[in-house]
Image: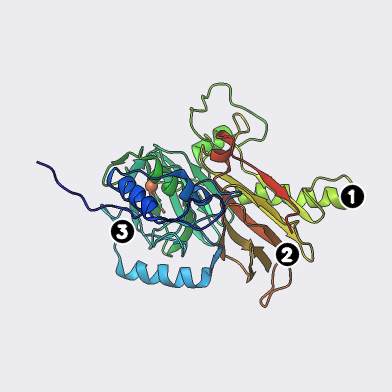
Amino acid sequence: MSTTLPTPFRLTAVDGPDQPEPTPALEHLYRGFEQELLVPLWTEIGDLMPLHPRSRAVPHLWRWERLVELAARAGDLVPVGRGGERRAIALANPTLAGRPFATPTLWAAIQYLMPGEDAPEHRHTQHAFRFVVEGEGVWTVVGGDPVPMRRGDFLPQAGWNWHAHHNATDAPMAWIDGLDIPLQHLTEAQFFEFGREEISDAERIEPERSRSERLWGHPGLRPLAASAGSRGTPLLAYRWEHTDRALTDQLRLEQEGFGGTVEAGHAAVRFTNPADGSDVLPTIRAEFHRVVRGAETTPVRETGSSVYQVFDGSGTVTVGDQRWSVTRGDLFVVPSWEPFSARSEAGRTDSDAGHLDLFRFSDAPVFEALGLDRTQKDSR
Ligand code: GTQ
Ligand code: FE2
Protein backbone atom coordinates (compact mmCIF):
# COMPACT_ATOMS: atom_id res chain seq x y z
CA MET A 1 0.00 0.00 0.00
CA SER A 2 1.34 3.39 -0.83
CA THR A 3 0.44 6.49 1.10
CA THR A 4 0.94 9.90 -0.35
CA LEU A 5 2.32 12.39 2.11
CA PRO A 6 1.67 16.02 1.44
CA THR A 7 4.82 17.64 0.07
CA PRO A 8 6.43 19.33 3.09
CA PHE A 9 7.94 22.13 1.04
CA ARG A 10 7.50 23.88 -2.26
CA LEU A 11 10.41 24.72 -4.50
CA THR A 12 10.15 27.89 -6.50
CA ALA A 13 12.47 29.23 -9.12
CA VAL A 14 14.72 31.90 -7.66
CA ASP A 15 15.65 35.10 -9.46
CA GLY A 16 19.31 35.97 -9.49
CA PRO A 17 22.73 35.58 -11.06
CA ASP A 18 23.56 32.02 -12.08
CA GLN A 19 19.99 30.84 -11.45
CA PRO A 20 18.43 28.68 -14.17
CA GLU A 21 15.77 30.22 -16.40
CA PRO A 22 12.25 29.55 -15.04
CA THR A 23 10.82 27.47 -17.89
CA PRO A 24 8.04 24.83 -17.79
CA ALA A 25 10.81 22.20 -17.96
CA LEU A 26 12.46 23.67 -14.84
CA GLU A 27 9.07 23.69 -13.07
CA HIS A 28 8.73 20.01 -13.97
CA LEU A 29 12.23 19.29 -12.57
CA TYR A 30 11.36 21.08 -9.31
CA ARG A 31 8.11 19.06 -8.94
CA GLY A 32 10.22 15.93 -9.35
CA PHE A 33 12.61 17.15 -6.61
CA GLU A 34 9.63 17.77 -4.32
CA GLN A 35 8.21 14.30 -4.87
CA GLU A 36 11.52 12.67 -4.00
CA LEU A 37 12.21 15.08 -1.09
CA LEU A 38 15.22 16.66 -2.70
CA VAL A 39 16.38 20.25 -2.42
CA PRO A 40 19.06 21.70 -4.69
CA LEU A 41 21.83 23.78 -3.16
CA TRP A 42 21.48 26.58 -5.70
CA THR A 43 18.13 27.85 -4.33
CA GLU A 44 19.26 27.71 -0.68
CA ILE A 45 22.88 28.69 -0.60
CA GLY A 46 22.40 32.30 0.55
CA ASP A 47 20.56 31.14 3.67
CA LEU A 48 22.57 27.96 4.39
CA MET A 49 26.03 29.32 3.72
CA PRO A 50 25.87 33.07 4.34
CA LEU A 51 28.87 35.33 3.87
CA HIS A 52 28.80 36.18 7.59
CA PRO A 53 26.66 35.19 10.60
CA ARG A 54 23.05 36.34 10.50
CA SER A 55 21.46 35.47 13.81
CA ARG A 56 17.87 34.29 14.05
CA ALA A 57 17.83 36.17 17.37
CA VAL A 58 17.63 39.96 17.70
CA PRO A 59 19.07 42.37 20.27
CA HIS A 60 16.52 42.81 23.06
CA LEU A 61 16.29 44.39 26.52
CA TRP A 62 14.24 43.27 29.54
CA ARG A 63 13.74 45.70 32.45
CA TRP A 64 14.52 44.22 35.88
CA GLU A 65 11.78 46.25 37.54
CA ARG A 66 9.13 44.52 35.42
CA LEU A 67 10.68 41.06 35.80
CA VAL A 68 10.67 41.30 39.59
CA GLU A 69 7.12 42.62 39.64
CA LEU A 70 5.84 39.70 37.54
CA ALA A 71 7.96 37.11 39.38
CA ALA A 72 6.55 38.34 42.70
CA ARG A 73 3.03 37.93 41.34
CA ALA A 74 3.94 34.39 40.23
CA GLY A 75 5.14 33.85 43.81
CA ASP A 76 1.59 34.48 45.02
CA LEU A 77 -0.16 32.44 42.33
CA VAL A 78 2.11 29.56 41.30
CA PRO A 79 3.26 26.86 43.73
CA VAL A 80 6.75 25.42 43.38
CA GLY A 81 7.02 21.64 43.58
CA ARG A 82 7.29 18.41 41.66
CA GLY A 83 6.45 18.69 37.99
CA GLY A 84 7.14 22.35 37.37
CA GLU A 85 10.21 21.97 39.61
CA ARG A 86 11.19 25.65 39.60
CA ARG A 87 9.44 29.03 39.65
CA ALA A 88 11.65 30.20 36.80
CA ILE A 89 10.47 32.60 34.11
CA ALA A 90 12.62 32.68 30.97
CA LEU A 91 13.51 35.52 28.64
CA ALA A 92 12.11 34.75 25.18
CA ASN A 93 13.89 36.38 22.27
CA PRO A 94 11.18 37.94 20.06
CA THR A 95 12.34 36.22 16.87
CA LEU A 96 12.86 32.71 18.28
CA ALA A 97 9.32 31.54 17.61
CA GLY A 98 7.94 31.97 21.11
CA ARG A 99 10.43 29.48 22.58
CA PRO A 100 11.81 30.39 26.03
CA PHE A 101 15.26 31.00 24.56
CA ALA A 102 17.18 34.24 25.15
CA THR A 103 19.49 33.32 22.26
CA PRO A 104 19.68 30.23 20.02
CA THR A 105 21.97 28.57 22.62
CA LEU A 106 21.30 30.23 26.00
CA TRP A 107 18.53 30.16 28.59
CA ALA A 108 18.21 33.10 30.99
CA ALA A 109 15.48 33.23 33.62
CA ILE A 110 14.43 35.00 36.78
CA GLN A 111 13.78 32.52 39.59
CA TYR A 112 11.76 33.39 42.68
CA LEU A 113 11.44 31.60 46.02
CA MET A 114 9.01 32.63 48.74
CA PRO A 115 9.95 32.65 52.46
CA GLY A 116 10.51 29.12 53.75
CA GLU A 117 9.99 27.55 50.33
CA ASP A 118 12.06 24.70 48.87
CA ALA A 119 12.59 23.97 45.18
CA PRO A 120 12.81 20.16 45.01
CA GLU A 121 15.96 18.20 44.24
CA HIS A 122 16.72 17.13 40.68
CA ARG A 123 19.60 16.76 38.26
CA HIS A 124 20.00 17.16 34.53
CA THR A 125 22.67 17.19 31.85
CA GLN A 126 22.15 20.92 31.28
CA HIS A 127 24.92 23.09 32.74
CA ALA A 128 23.68 25.91 34.94
CA PHE A 129 24.60 28.87 37.11
CA ARG A 130 22.91 31.44 39.37
CA PHE A 131 23.80 35.11 39.59
CA VAL A 132 22.45 37.41 42.29
CA VAL A 133 21.78 41.08 41.60
CA GLU A 134 19.89 41.77 44.84
CA GLY A 135 18.88 40.08 48.06
CA GLU A 136 20.03 37.01 49.96
CA GLY A 137 18.68 34.20 52.06
CA VAL A 138 18.55 31.25 49.66
CA TRP A 139 20.93 28.31 49.97
CA THR A 140 21.36 26.26 46.83
CA VAL A 141 22.20 22.72 47.92
CA VAL A 142 24.50 21.14 45.31
CA GLY A 143 25.43 17.49 45.87
CA GLY A 144 24.53 17.90 49.55
CA ASP A 145 26.67 21.04 49.98
CA PRO A 146 24.60 24.09 51.05
CA VAL A 147 25.86 27.22 49.24
CA PRO A 148 24.63 30.65 50.40
CA MET A 149 23.58 33.10 47.69
CA ARG A 150 24.15 36.84 48.15
CA ARG A 151 24.27 39.97 45.98
CA GLY A 152 27.12 39.84 43.48
CA ASP A 153 27.79 36.12 43.89
CA PHE A 154 28.21 33.86 40.86
CA LEU A 155 27.27 30.22 41.51
CA PRO A 156 28.03 27.73 38.74
CA GLN A 157 26.86 24.16 38.81
CA ALA A 158 27.90 21.71 36.09
CA GLY A 159 25.44 19.24 34.62
CA TRP A 160 24.36 16.07 36.45
CA ASN A 161 24.89 17.46 39.97
CA TRP A 162 21.91 16.98 42.27
CA HIS A 163 20.54 20.36 43.33
CA ALA A 164 17.72 21.89 45.34
CA HIS A 165 17.13 25.47 46.54
CA HIS A 166 16.03 26.42 50.01
CA ASN A 167 14.85 29.84 51.19
CA ALA A 168 15.78 29.99 54.87
CA THR A 169 14.51 33.51 55.55
CA ASP A 170 11.22 35.34 55.92
CA ALA A 171 11.71 37.37 52.73
CA PRO A 172 11.28 36.30 49.11
CA MET A 173 14.39 36.15 46.94
CA ALA A 174 14.91 36.56 43.20
CA TRP A 175 17.99 35.73 41.14
CA ILE A 176 18.86 34.84 37.56
CA ASP A 177 19.60 31.41 36.17
CA GLY A 178 21.70 30.80 33.06
CA LEU A 179 21.65 27.38 31.39
CA ASP A 180 22.51 25.83 28.03
CA ILE A 181 18.95 24.50 27.60
CA PRO A 182 18.51 25.69 23.96
CA LEU A 183 21.87 24.26 22.92
CA GLN A 184 21.18 20.90 24.57
CA HIS A 185 17.69 20.89 23.07
CA LEU A 186 19.34 20.93 19.64
CA THR A 187 21.76 18.12 20.55
CA GLU A 188 18.96 15.68 21.57
CA ALA A 189 21.25 14.31 24.27
CA GLN A 190 19.53 15.55 27.46
CA PHE A 191 18.78 13.48 30.56
CA PHE A 192 16.85 14.45 33.70
CA GLU A 193 16.20 12.73 37.05
CA PHE A 194 13.94 13.64 39.94
CA GLY A 195 15.61 13.52 43.36
CA ARG A 196 14.26 13.30 46.88
CA GLU A 197 11.07 15.12 47.84
CA GLU A 198 12.82 16.81 50.77
CA ILE A 199 16.43 17.60 51.51
CA SER A 200 17.70 16.18 54.82
CA ASP A 201 17.95 18.18 58.05
CA ALA A 202 21.73 17.93 57.75
CA GLU A 203 21.49 19.83 54.45
CA ARG A 204 18.96 22.30 55.79
CA ILE A 205 21.71 24.14 57.63
CA GLU A 206 22.80 27.64 56.70
CA PRO A 207 26.60 27.87 56.73
CA GLU A 208 28.35 31.12 55.76
CA ARG A 209 30.50 29.23 53.27
CA SER A 210 30.04 26.03 51.30
CA ARG A 211 32.36 23.05 51.68
CA SER A 212 33.44 23.62 48.05
CA GLU A 213 34.73 27.10 48.93
CA ARG A 214 36.59 25.85 51.99
CA LEU A 215 38.38 23.33 49.74
CA TRP A 216 38.78 25.21 46.43
CA GLY A 217 38.26 28.89 47.24
CA HIS A 218 41.80 29.98 48.09
CA PRO A 219 43.58 31.85 45.25
CA GLY A 220 46.40 29.88 43.66
CA LEU A 221 46.17 27.03 46.15
CA ARG A 222 45.10 23.67 44.84
CA PRO A 223 44.12 21.15 47.51
CA LEU A 224 46.33 18.08 47.08
CA ALA A 225 43.78 15.61 48.40
CA ALA A 226 40.91 16.65 46.16
CA SER A 227 39.98 15.60 42.67
CA ALA A 228 38.41 18.36 40.61
CA GLY A 229 36.01 16.10 38.75
CA SER A 230 35.86 15.97 35.00
CA ARG A 231 33.21 18.52 34.02
CA GLY A 232 33.10 22.12 35.09
CA THR A 233 34.47 23.89 38.12
CA PRO A 234 34.58 22.25 41.57
CA LEU A 235 34.11 25.71 43.14
CA LEU A 236 30.40 26.34 43.65
CA ALA A 237 30.53 30.04 44.58
CA TYR A 238 32.55 33.02 43.34
CA ARG A 239 32.01 35.75 45.93
CA TRP A 240 31.37 39.39 45.16
CA GLU A 241 34.13 40.60 47.49
CA HIS A 242 36.72 38.83 45.31
CA THR A 243 35.26 40.00 41.99
CA ASP A 244 34.92 43.57 43.22
CA ARG A 245 38.46 43.66 44.60
CA ALA A 246 39.92 42.27 41.35
CA LEU A 247 38.19 44.97 39.29
CA THR A 248 39.12 47.74 41.73
CA ASP A 249 42.76 46.64 41.64
CA GLN A 250 42.83 46.57 37.83
CA LEU A 251 41.59 50.16 37.66
CA ARG A 252 44.07 51.31 40.32
CA LEU A 253 46.92 49.66 38.40
CA GLU A 254 45.83 51.53 35.30
CA GLN A 255 45.76 54.83 37.22
CA GLU A 256 49.25 54.15 38.52
CA GLY A 257 50.46 53.59 34.96
CA PHE A 258 50.92 49.82 35.18
CA GLY A 259 48.21 48.76 32.72
CA GLY A 260 46.00 46.00 34.06
CA THR A 261 42.80 46.88 32.23
CA VAL A 262 41.65 45.54 28.86
CA GLU A 263 41.41 49.13 27.57
CA ALA A 264 41.29 52.59 29.16
CA GLY A 265 38.64 52.67 31.86
CA HIS A 266 37.52 49.09 31.24
CA ALA A 267 38.40 46.38 33.77
CA ALA A 268 37.28 42.79 33.22
CA VAL A 269 37.62 39.29 34.67
CA ARG A 270 36.56 35.83 33.63
CA PHE A 271 35.28 33.30 36.17
CA THR A 272 37.46 30.19 35.82
CA ASN A 273 37.91 26.67 37.09
CA PRO A 274 40.58 26.85 39.86
CA ALA A 275 41.88 23.40 38.91
CA ASP A 276 42.97 24.30 35.38
CA GLY A 277 41.96 27.87 34.50
CA SER A 278 39.35 26.74 31.97
CA ASP A 279 35.82 28.09 31.72
CA VAL A 280 33.58 27.34 34.70
CA LEU A 281 31.19 25.26 32.61
CA PRO A 282 31.79 23.24 29.41
CA THR A 283 29.26 25.27 27.43
CA ILE A 284 29.09 28.60 29.27
CA ARG A 285 31.62 31.38 29.85
CA ALA A 286 31.01 33.99 32.53
CA GLU A 287 32.69 37.38 32.92
CA PHE A 288 32.40 40.60 34.85
CA HIS A 289 33.10 44.00 33.28
CA ARG A 290 33.49 47.40 34.93
CA VAL A 291 33.40 50.58 32.82
CA VAL A 292 34.49 53.81 34.51
CA ARG A 293 32.11 56.78 34.41
CA GLY A 294 32.54 58.58 31.10
CA ALA A 295 34.44 55.72 29.42
CA GLU A 296 33.12 53.73 26.48
CA THR A 297 34.21 50.25 25.40
CA THR A 298 35.44 49.67 21.86
CA PRO A 299 32.71 48.11 19.71
CA VAL A 300 33.36 44.38 19.29
CA ARG A 301 31.58 41.72 17.31
CA GLU A 302 32.01 38.04 18.09
CA THR A 303 30.57 34.76 16.89
CA GLY A 304 28.31 33.20 19.50
CA SER A 305 25.80 34.98 21.69
CA SER A 306 25.82 36.64 25.11
CA VAL A 307 23.40 37.72 27.79
CA TYR A 308 24.31 40.69 30.02
CA GLN A 309 22.87 41.85 33.31
CA VAL A 310 23.59 45.32 34.66
CA PHE A 311 24.85 44.74 38.18
CA ASP A 312 25.34 48.35 39.15
CA GLY A 313 25.55 51.87 37.77
CA SER A 314 23.92 53.13 34.64
CA GLY A 315 24.82 53.92 31.09
CA THR A 316 24.07 53.35 27.47
CA VAL A 317 24.62 50.07 25.66
CA THR A 318 24.63 49.63 21.91
CA VAL A 319 23.87 46.27 20.32
CA GLY A 320 23.71 46.25 16.52
CA ASP A 321 21.30 49.04 15.59
CA GLN A 322 19.70 49.16 19.05
CA ARG A 323 20.67 51.56 21.84
CA TRP A 324 19.27 51.51 25.37
CA SER A 325 19.74 53.43 28.60
CA VAL A 326 20.22 50.77 31.22
CA THR A 327 20.21 50.60 34.98
CA ARG A 328 20.62 48.04 37.77
CA GLY A 329 19.22 44.59 36.99
CA ASP A 330 18.33 45.19 33.34
CA LEU A 331 19.09 42.23 31.04
CA PHE A 332 19.87 42.31 27.35
CA VAL A 333 21.10 39.94 24.65
CA VAL A 334 23.85 40.29 22.09
CA PRO A 335 23.21 37.91 19.17
CA SER A 336 26.05 36.42 17.15
CA TRP A 337 28.13 38.94 15.20
CA GLU A 338 26.17 42.01 16.40
CA PRO A 339 28.57 44.79 17.43
CA PHE A 340 28.43 45.59 21.15
CA SER A 341 29.67 48.55 23.16
CA ALA A 342 28.86 50.05 26.55
CA ARG A 343 29.20 53.57 27.90
CA SER A 344 29.07 54.45 31.58
CA GLU A 345 26.98 57.54 32.34
CA ALA A 346 25.18 59.13 35.26
CA GLY A 347 21.64 57.79 35.45
CA ARG A 348 18.41 59.18 36.82
CA THR A 349 18.83 57.51 40.20
CA ASP A 350 22.49 57.48 41.02
CA SER A 351 23.88 56.28 44.29
CA ASP A 352 26.69 54.18 42.88
CA ALA A 353 30.43 54.71 42.62
CA GLY A 354 30.09 55.97 39.07
CA HIS A 355 30.99 52.71 37.35
CA LEU A 356 28.87 50.64 35.04
CA ASP A 357 29.17 47.04 36.28
CA LEU A 358 28.12 44.34 33.83
CA PHE A 359 27.77 40.61 34.39
CA ARG A 360 28.05 38.66 31.14
CA PHE A 361 27.59 35.04 30.13
CA SER A 362 28.05 33.50 26.71
CA ASP A 363 28.35 30.27 24.75
CA ALA A 364 32.01 31.00 23.87
CA PRO A 365 33.44 27.62 25.07
CA VAL A 366 31.32 25.81 22.49
CA PHE A 367 32.50 28.04 19.67
CA GLU A 368 36.13 27.71 20.75
CA ALA A 369 35.88 23.92 21.02
CA LEU A 370 34.50 23.77 17.48
CA GLY A 371 36.96 26.25 16.01
CA LEU A 372 34.12 28.66 15.20
CA ASP A 373 35.23 31.55 17.41
CA ARG A 374 35.98 34.81 15.62
CA THR A 375 36.33 38.34 16.99
CA GLN A 376 36.40 41.68 15.20
CA LYS A 377 37.47 44.67 17.29
CA ASP A 378 36.46 48.22 16.58
CA SER A 379 33.58 47.05 14.39
CA ARG A 380 32.10 50.54 13.92
O1 GTQ B 1 17.18 26.03 39.33
O2 GTQ B 1 17.43 23.95 38.82
O3 GTQ B 1 15.86 28.42 35.29
O4 GTQ B 1 16.61 23.16 36.43
C1 GTQ B 1 15.76 26.17 34.60
C2 GTQ B 1 15.95 24.84 34.91
C3 GTQ B 1 16.46 26.74 36.82
C4 GTQ B 1 17.13 25.10 38.50
C5 GTQ B 1 16.02 27.13 35.57
C6 GTQ B 1 16.41 24.45 36.16
C7 GTQ B 1 16.66 25.42 37.13
FE1 FE2 C 1 17.92 22.39 37.72
Question: Which type of secondary structure does the marked residue at label 1 adopt?
Answer: loop
Q: Position of residue 236 (x, y in %)?
A: 51, 41
Q: Quadrant of residue 340?
A: bottom right
- Label 3, on which residue? 80
Q: Position of residue 56 (x, y in %)?
A: 49, 56
Residue at (35, 47) in percent of width and height: 29
- Label 1, on which residue? 256
Looking at numbered disc 3 in the image, what kind of residue is underneath it? Val
The 10 Å Cα crowd at callout 3, few under 14, some 14 to 19, many 20 or more, is many
Say which label, 3 or 1, has the lower sequence index: 3
User: Spatial distance from mark 1 to mark 2, Cα to Cα?
Assistant: 23 Å
Q: Quadrant of residue 122?
A: top left
Looking at numbered disc 2 in the image, what kind of residue is underneath it? Arg
- Label 2, on which residue? 343
**Does residue 109 appear to the left or right of 246 in the view shown?**
left
Q: Quadrant of the N terminus?
A: top left
Q: Nearer the viewer, residue 367 or 236?
A: 367
Please, is residue 65 above or below residue 2 in the view? Answer: below
Q: How is the image coloured?
A: rainbow
Please, is residue 51 above or below residue 324 in the view? Answer: above
Q: Disc 3 vs disc 2: which is toward the camera?
A: 2
